[in-house]
Amino acid sequence: MHETGPFSIPAIRDFVPSKLRPWIIIAFVIVFQFSGGLYLAAVNEMVGSTALMQEDIMMAGYASMVGMGLTFAIMFRLKFRFTSKASLMTCSIALIISNLICMHTHSIPVLVITCFFAGIFRMWATFECNSTIQLWLTPKRDLSVFFCFIYLLVQSCIQLSGLVTIYTAFWAKWEYMHWLIIGLLLLVMLVTLWLFRSYRSLPKLPLFGIDWLGALMWGLVLLCILFVCVYGEHYDWYQSFQIRVATIIGTLILVLNLWRASFIRHPFIALKTWTYRSVWLPFILYIVIDILLAPSHPFEHVYMEGILGYDALNVISLNWVVLLGIVVGAGFTLFTFSRRKWRYKTMTVIAFSSITGYLMYFYFGIEYALPKETLFIPLFLRSFGYVMIAICFLTVLSRVPFQHFFQAVSVQSFVSAGFGGALGTAILGHALNGAMKKNAMLLGAGLDHVNPFVSRISAGELYGVVQQQALMVSMKELYGWLILLALFCLLVFLVYESDIRPYKVLHPTYRSIRRFVKHELRMDKKLEATG
């Protein structure tokens, strides 16, 4: 860490007050974070008006995240190739075109490709803005402080975007959200033209040497994984030709890409990047976290809408609680992890404990007549724990050498923003369907004409009651398994590097035995030499 000179943004014209310039950049970041190809909060409205399946829209939304993740590896090159003014104008125009296409097209390939490129330009613009104000946020370039701001801003914008989307769709139509974002992007362009100048602090760095083919291959691998996770239940998994083909294609491209990266000069993701412990360990843990947090997608919405009977406005209003958890989690991490320098292990244990509390609260509290206020605590714990663990996992990448740092960020984003959520949802959704069938069969075994209560209820009402009860039992059962997984992870974290770790218990004894054996061997050699 080192001190730097006074903070300034020379790309903004001189007549703009210095204290106002960072806030203009933050306003730009919020607009770019709100923008995107699709707004998944309005997926039900889109399904009804576009005749697309929910899986089609989710696939397009995840494709946007894949584009965002791939951009990290080349962000540094883009920063030094284009001026801030050129980058902001280019990204704004691209996102406006993406919104127009996504609003009018009903073609699934066009929708997915458009969202993929929308994610690229969205991340490019976000990085351009955040890197401009990094020294304003932390003059010592403390990445733990910087990433607290990043996750506070990004996660907060996700929740606020969902709120704005639902309220817009409720009072008007879901297309009006696209028009709102287009208007904000046009405002960003006007402000950029008025306040920014074409300033370049360093010589122009050409985009030579970038492995564009490798980027395309990584994108295709991730899209194949997403296709399997999103459409797996719809096509009955590996009983279908589509899922088998997607798996084979994704595996072949992955093997070919890794083999190609072993001999070309500048691969998009170097094989060395995967060898760092700071890269592969968070990659694995993110998959576990996404599985633990997967109930937020298939369980909570089904429970709130199907059993508790909440409408879309009541469900989306809980985003305010999630937003509060994000703010508190980022603030707690800033105070303890960034300022007090708490250890990664301590922060990980606290975060996993929060996620475990979220699962336990639903396991013990789920019932048919649950007040909405009762859901505040588990949703708060979920967002609090996730933001904390995300900041720590991103900060640990600072241990990776600079030449591989941005590639490591891309690797982590593959699972954190790319396929991790889809994978967790697919695993838990498939488990829920299997548990539903089993429990419905067990619950309905005694509902025959011999039962005196069956004759008093119509067949349709009886079927609905059985399905609802099977859903409740299945959700509680799966919450229980997730709690066991979370407790196992906590036990591993607590034992790791502690005094009761088997390696630490046995290692002193092992060293003593080894020293004794070496001493005896030396004495034998001396006796042989003297004999």
Image (cartoon, rainbow, N blue to C red):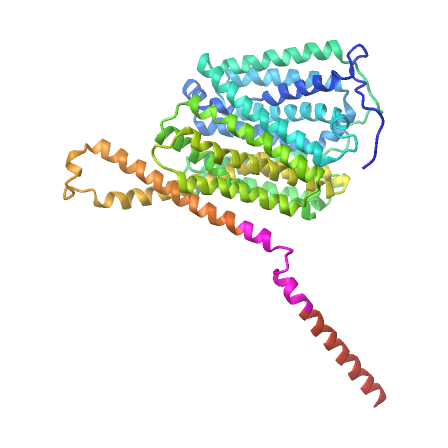
Q: Quadrant of residue 131?
A: top right
Q: Is residue 143 above or below residue 481?
A: above
Q: Is residue 502 magenta?
A: yes
Q: Is residue 247 above or below residue 72?
A: below
Percent coordinates x, y for residue 419 in the rendering? 55, 37
Percent coordinates x, y for residue 321 in the rendering? 51, 28
Taking the spot 67% from the left edge, 66% from the top edge, the residue there is 507
Q: Is residue 8 magenta?
A: no
Q: Is residue 502 above or below residue 349?
A: below
Answer whether residue 389 is visible to the viewer in this image. yes
Q: Nearer the viewer, residue 223 or 464?
A: 464
Q: Quadrant of the C terminus?
A: bottom right
Q: Nearer the viewer, residue 414 or 213?
A: 414
- Left or right: residue 295 versus residue 468 is right
Answer whether residue 284 is visible to the viewer in this image. no
Q: Quadrant of the N terminus?
A: top right
Per the rendered image, the range of residues in magenta is 489-508
Q: Nearer the viewer, residue 251 or 404?
A: 404
Q: Quadrant of residue 518?
A: bottom right
Percent coordinates x, y for residue 411 in the rendering? 65, 39
Percent coordinates x, y for residue 158 in the rendering? 56, 26
- Left or right: residue 82 versus residue 203 is left
- Left or right: residue 14 versus residue 338 is right
Taking the spot 44% from the left edge, 47% from the top edge, the residue there is 481
Provide the major secondary structure of the magenta segment: helix
Q: Quadrant of residue 469?
A: top left
- Left or right: residue 334 versus residue 351 is right
Taking the spot 78% from the left edge, 24% from the top edge, the residue there is 81
Q: Is residue 528 above or below residue 395?
A: below
